[in-house]
Image: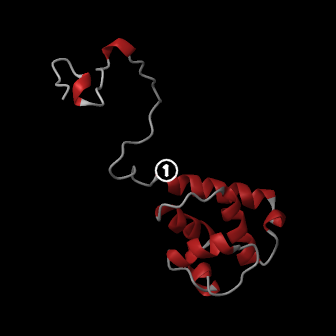
Amino acid sequence: MNVKLRNIGPKSAAWLRQVGLRTREDLVEAGTVGAFMKVRRAGFKPSLNLLYALEGALQDCHWQDVPDARRVELVQAAEAAIAQLPPPRGRPAAAPVTTTHHEEAAAPAFALFDDDRPGGSAD
């Protein structure tokens, strides 16, 4: 953002600038959830604190003073918007993590020098 807004620190301001939200008017036009989703769709990993900070900036109050009922509305709207996002390109959606164990004997032995290999020449 080119303008200093309440609750918006340097990192959040940089994210907002990078997604084209440079003025208070841009933020008003996008709305709290819209701005949050622009940041998220750009590949950043915003927390709910950004959602509350954006709302506080628009309401001109500290982000911790955003009423609980409004926070719940914002979270529900953000979760609904996130659910509509397509899965990340080039990567499958997150799945359970599995661990593969390999036997040490199954790994080939690596020779660092030619004379360490069987049949290698020793000049």
Q: Residue at x 47, y 30 (%)?
A: 96
Amino acid residing under circle 1: Ala
For residue 25, above or below residue 49: below
Q: Is residue 113 left or right of residue 57?
A: left
Residue displayed at 77% across by 57% down: 69
Quarter location, residue 95: top left
Which one is in front, 85 or 41? Answer: 41
Tell me if mark 1 has few (under 14), some (14-19) or many (20+) residues whose alpha carbon lies within 10 angstroms of its own. few
Residue 71 position, x and y percent, is: 73, 58
**Type of colouring:** secondary structure
Question: Between 76 and 50, which is closer to the camera in this rendering?
Answer: 50
Q: Is residue 24 above or below residue 81?
A: below
Which quadrant is home to the C terminus?
top left
Instruction: Please tell me whether residue 17 is drawn above or below residue 40 in the rendered image.
Output: below
Q: Is residue 95 left or right of residue 3?
A: left
Task: Please give the residue where the numbered disc 1 appears in the rendered image.
Answer: 83
Tell me the quarter of the picture where residue 68 sits: bottom right
As helix, strand or loop, the secondary structure at mark 1 comes to helix
Q: Determine if residue 103 is in view.
A: no
Residue 57 is at least partly visible in this image: yes
Location of the N terminus (image quadrant) = bottom right
Where's residue 113, x and y in %? 27, 30
Going 15% across and 18% down the picture, which residue do you hit?
119
Lateral position of residue 101 relative to residue 65, left or right: left
Q: Does residue 73 appear left or right of residue 100 in this picture?
A: right
Q: How many marks?
A: 1
Q: Position of residue 30 (x, y in %)?
A: 56, 76
In front of the other: 108 or 2: 108
**Residue 17: quarter of image:** bottom right
- Where is residue 10? Give x, y as percent: 67, 74
- The residue sitting at 54% across, 53% down in the picture is 80
